[in-house]
Amino acid sequence: MNLYKSLLLIFLFISIFFTTCVTTAPKAFLSSGNFVPVKIPLDFFGMVHAGNSGTTEEYQLLNELGAIWLLQTFYWGRIEREKDHFNFTMYDNFVNIAKENNKKVIAVMAYDTPWIKSKGEKRRYISPENITHFLNFLEVTVRHFKGKVDVWQIWNEPNFKFWNGTNKEFYELSKLAAQRIRETDPDAYIIGGGYSRVPKNFIRGMYKAGAMENLDAISFHPYAMTPIAAMRLHDKFIDILSEINFTKEVWITEMGYPTAGWYPHKVSLNNLPSYIIKTVVGAAIRNPRVFCWYELFDSHNHGKAPSNFDSEMFFGLVYPDHSWKDGAFSYSLCANFLPGSYYFPELPKKTNIPSNIVSYCFMDGASGYNTLIMWNDRNSSQKIKISLSTSFTLHDISSGNNVVMQNDSIINITNKPVFITWQDTDEIHITRVTR
């Protein structure tokens, strides 16, 4: 994503969502209702543009945040700048250090290289006569990183400004690219798409051209002005995939909000934690395979950016000096407590809870904790009593601070999400307090 996205983001002003999967849930939490729990994968969380420094400090930061996947663009022009001269040094270092730190790598294979271009020829385009060169680049690269790169994604946002050819030309490129990767490594995991929002006709065209036949999954980027709008995009994406009978996995390989600049979906630093919690929870219960946040770092430390115009400088969760934005704590809470858990739509148990109180319960997480996330959909407050047979921890989503609360404690629920964890296996009960 870059400044070109500004053209598309204008249309977000007119944008103002549910699939579940059958899983095997722990018997302790199976209910007698007809609800189906959703399993949150252990490696659900990822980060875009992360791990580039290769330093211990950056990987410690990623561990604290809870990110498992690292999405990195493998630029053709950096690997094969001259015909048949491949230089993998930069990407070898990146991949090797990622593996040493138990991270998984999504390699986005994309863009052009100088030697295929005539003077003045458009960028981010591979003409039909040059596709064979791109396929050779794919083959050599996939063979070189076989067993090290976990996922290969073909291109990025081809329906936006990252592909400057015709749609039909991209369909053919994508189809041949997936075939070549599959021939080179039959065990490769291949993602297509990387779509910006939900380009229905583009997706239909890919399907009709046979460009999805060798894919293991398809990905998209639900950038929107609000978490609700982002999840509406997710539901529309699922709808179009159902229409074409694409039943393989869905990945969200980019999602984020800038905290400055002129993009219409920018949010204030104060609101970023709430937006992150609501977006992550909305995505998690819809069961995509992986959720990658865009991105790790702002381009400048807090207050040091030369301009507040370019939103691309302000998508990070962390500043370059490794100080955290408030939103980093909310991402970290989700990434450290939700993986391995089961979302139960019928929980928590409720007494006199109004419809404006939104609640999501995740049980039996790999962390050993259960999680309840709640907020008020209205700009008001409501007192809620939390009933458990044990104490619980209330986490501040902006600071990461926490406080231990006792059974039957009363909490004030506002539009800012409340994040609660506990270790007891009993179901949690919430009650509206009217006095």
Image (cartoon, helix red, strand yellow):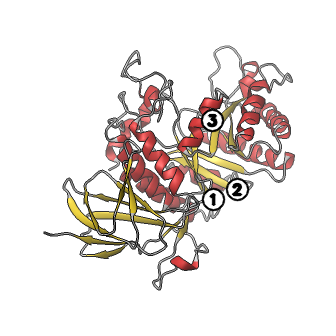
Q: Amino acid at mark 3?
A: Tyr
Q: The residue under label 1 is which amino acid type?
A: Glu
Q: Which residue is mark 2?
A: 216
Give residue 320's position: percent from left, percent from top. Answer: 51, 25
Q: Residue at x 61, y 38 (%)?
A: 156
Q: Residue at x 77, y 33 (%)?
A: 134
Distance between the alpha carbons at the discs numbered 1 and 3: 28 Å
Work out whether 103 lies above or below 133.
below
- Dot in front, 1 or 3: 3
Q: Nearer the viewer, residue 259 or 248?
A: 259
Residue 188: x and y in percent read 78, 50
- Cβ–Cβ below 8 Å for labels 2 and 3? no
Q: Is residue 173 visible?
A: yes
Residue 365 picture location, percent across and down: 55, 62
Q: Quadrant of residue 83?
A: top right
Q: Is residue 74 left or right of residue 202?
A: right
Disc 1, SS? strand
Q: Quadrant of the C terminus?
A: bottom left
Residue 381, image quadrant: bottom left
Q: Position of residue 215 (x, y in %)?
A: 71, 54
Label 3 neighbourhood size at 10 Å, few (<14), some (14-19), many (20+)?
Answer: many
